[in-house]
Image (tube, rainbow, N blue to C red):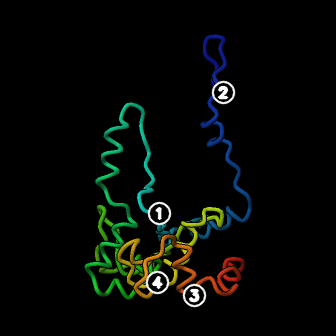
Amino acid sequence: MVLTAGQVQYNAIANYVDARYVNAPEAMWRLLGSHINDRSHAVMRLPVHLPNQKRVTFKDGHEEETSEAARSRQTMFESWFQLNQSDLDAQTLLNTDIPYNYMYDRNNWKRRKRGGNKIVARMYVLNVKDAERFYLRIMLLHVLGTASFKFLRTVDNVIYDTFKQAAFHRHLLNSYEEWDHCLHL
């Protein structure tokens, strides 16, 4: 609180910093030189989207430029398809295993030289009500070498119309194992 010419000015941030309370355990940690918080692993979020359903953020007045950029730009997910088309090693990995061996930089996946053991890959959680994306996600957790959306919908040389049908014909929905797995995570 500062008094100036009969007015009272209240600075909430300065008051918070000046009146910070340090409890006994935190004081002991600081006195012993231990880290209060530390960053050990990087979390890489892996997006999942359906064909032609990229996430786009628009700014007022720039709708045309944004939509044109979204059409021409590949998402991280689509870049993973490109990686699987060109790299035989990537075809042996699931979507969730890619960040341990590759890094995503400037809309491309590049082979990682070091640091893959400090990554935690997390695929976005999807609701069962968003059925097609949910079944797409299930297949990404089980199918190796995915090169396109069409590749995922193809089972035994038959191209199915939906990801749910493809997941069913891949025998990923024939038991309650996936639901049990969901509930135990």
Density class for disc 3 (Cα within 10 Å; few <14, some 14-19, many ≥20) is: few
Question: Mark 4 touching mark 2, by CB under 8 A?
Answer: no
**Which residue: 67% across, 62% down?**
27
Q: Given the image, on which type of amino acid does mark 2 rest?
A: Met
Q: CA distance from mark 3 to mark 2?
A: 68 Å
- Name the residue tied to disc 4: 143
Residue 30 coordinates in the image, percent (x, y): 61, 64
Instruction: Identify which residue, 14 or 82, lies in the foreground.
Output: 82
Q: Position of residue 127 (x, y in %)?
A: 64, 64
Q: Quadrant of residue 151?
A: bottom left
Q: Give the residue displayed 72% in from the left and 65% down from the top.
A: 25
Q: Is residue 19 above or below residue 73?
A: above
Give the structural element (helix, strand or loop) at label 4. loop
N-terminal of the two: label 4 or label 1?
1
Question: Which class describes the residues within 10 Å of circle 1: few (<14), some (14-19), or many (20+)?
Answer: some
Whole-angstrom CA distance, mark 4 to mark 2, is: 62 Å
- As measured in the structure, the alpha-carbon distance from the residue carrying label 4 to the one carrying label 1 is 16 Å
Q: Which residue corresponds to mark 3?
A: 171
Q: Amino acid at mark 1?
A: Leu
Question: Earlier along the polypeptide chain: callout 4 or callout 3?
Answer: 4
Query: In the drawing, does residue 83 fall left or right of residue 31?
Result: left
Q: Secondary structure at mark 2?
A: loop
Between residues 116 and 160, which one lies in front from this camera angle?
A: 160
Residue positioned 36% across, 81% down in the render:
101
Q: Quick one: label 4 or label 2, which is nearer the N terminus?
A: 2
Q: Earlier in the sequence, mark 1 or mark 3?
A: 1
Find the residue positioned furthest to the top: 5
Q: In front of the other: label 4 or label 2?
A: 4
The residue lying at 44 percent from left, 45 percent from top is 57
Earlier sequence position, callout 2 versus callout 1: 2
Give the residue at mark 2: 1
> What is the secondary structure assignment of the residue under circle 3?
loop
